[in-house]
Image (cartoon, rainbow, N blue to C red):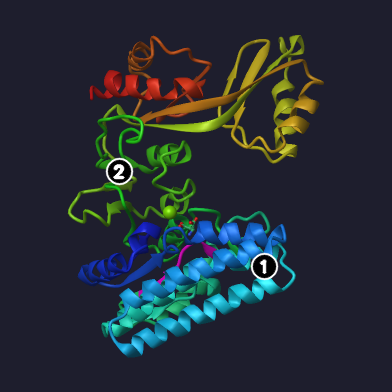
Amino acid sequence: MLVVKFGGTSVGKPERMKKIANLVLTMPGKKIVVLSALSGTTNTLVRIGDHLIAERHTAAHQEIAELEKHYLQFINELYESEAYQAIGQEIVSRYFSLFRLLAAGKFDDRSYRELLAQGELISTELFYHHLQERKVSARLLPALHFMSIDENQEPELEKISERLKPILETLNNIDILVTQGYICRNHRNEIDNLKRGGSDYTASLIGAAIRAEEIQIWTDIDGMHNNDPRIVKKTIPIAELTFDEASELAYFGAKILHPSTIVPAQKYHVPVRLKNTMDEKAAGTIISDKGSRGQFKAIAAKDGITAINIKSSRMLLAYGFLRKVFEVFERYKTPIDMISTSEVAVSVTIDDSKNLSSILEELRGFGTIEVDTKQSIICIVGNMLLEKEGVLKDVFHALATVPIRMVSYGGSQNNISILVDTNQKDKALNLLNEGIFHL
Ligand code: ASP
Ligand code: MG
């Protein structure tokens, strides 16, 4: 069984939705097709939700009306026959009545999450009926029947697997199953989601849960590139990556994959293939246990990083100091990304600065604190055998003219992380592209 996920832009126009239907039909064997909402929809639903939370009803209704127009136009172009036009209209009017109903009631966080879930529900329903119109045998597989997260918002992979098994057995004779990305139920059995961009994660969770042959993520770029194409002129697609390399990259800002996507696939050794809907023939990127050798594979950068330096003579020759520092971050549920220490000081970085002032307040008890905001982590990923000489030389040589705030190397064989001021980022990415990829 294949799990095939298409993102918002791949279903964002009627002709693209038709195109992915063609594509799915050329794929051999059984597949579960995971769809995102049509491009722009989730953003609009977020805006509507924000308006409703803030009781800006007129603005919310304006957005709803505009979105409705968009969908009416969409079905108009998607379906050929009058009968299916009528089905399309029924679908749109059902969803938009729900939006108006939600807008009219007491709008709380729960209604907000219910609203956000409608994007994927409507896109899959529209796609399913498109297949029906083409007389393709397919079935909808409601994600809310099997996809769940626990009280810590972590997906319940084993439960998902157990729930899927009997469902898939009864659908044994159907080759194409269409399901929603992103949406799930939480531990209170309410509608919830896997956070923005979560459809990739859905595909990986399903792929792992059913031990699929392969998980395919179809987007609008041809696989992962060695560097950020928006910043660097010449980039090249990466043919093969290991799971470890891919997770470093996804986490550090390679926008192509949701950061948690790799985890379930890696756990059950299901290869993840990244493909381009706009260029089906392009090889894309395959992420698997094997990967390929080669020292430097890719560079990714993550902005919005805050570096915190804690300097304390109490750290000198002491044990337990770092634990106390880390506990502060733990109390505020704030993950630390990079860390670098000296005998009397430690620097850490965080990207979630929601609780920064409370964290700083507590850290002041330990020593002198300095904070640098607007930093970027540049993460160089590859197969950097620690016993090999000269790995850092190439990197530092390339970055000779860039001030470097922090460095982290040796934590894994796959990563060198460098912290620079965000205003140095573009320069650093370009210099590394020349210096280590010779592009
Ligand atoms: N529709 C959701 C979003 O825009 C999930 C996804 O596209 O992966 O975040
Ligand atoms: Mg996406």
Tag 2 residue? 290
**Dot 1: few (<14), some (14–19), or many (≥20) neighbours within 10 Å?**
many
Name the quarter where the N terminus is drawn: bottom left
Nearer-the-camera pick, 297 or 414: 297
Question: Which residue is pictured at 65% across the width and 72% down the height?
Answer: 102
User: Going by the picture, which residue comes out furthest to the bottom?
Assistant: 83
The reply to whether residue 148 is visible in this rendering is: no
**Is the shortest distance between ligand 2 and the CB of mark 2 under 8 Å?**
no
Identity, as a three-letter code, of the amino acid under mark 2: Lys
Comes first in the chain, label 2 or label 1: 1
- The image position of residue 176, as x and y in percent, is 32, 75
Q: Which residues are magenta?
A: 177-188
Nearer-the-camera pick, 235 or 201: 235
Name the quarter where the C terminus is drawn: top left
Q: Does residue 28 show up magenta in the picture?
A: no
Badge count? 2
The reply to whether residue 68 is visible in this rendering is: yes
User: Going by the picture, which residue comes out furthest to the right?
Assistant: 365
Question: Which residue is pictured at 72% across the width and 64% down the height?
Answer: 108
Name the secondary structure under disc 1.
helix
Tag 1 residue? 111
Tell me, yes or no, whether the two marked residues, 2 and 1, touch with CB atoms within 8 Å.
no
Separation (CA) of disc 2 from disc 1: 44 Å
- The image position of residue 35, as x and y in percent, is 41, 65
Question: Which residue is pictured at 71% across the width and 37% down the height?
Answer: 330
Task: Look at the picture and state if 434 lies above or below 225.
Answer: above
Q: Quadrant of residue 133?
A: bottom left
- The image position of residue 325, as x and y in percent, is 72, 26
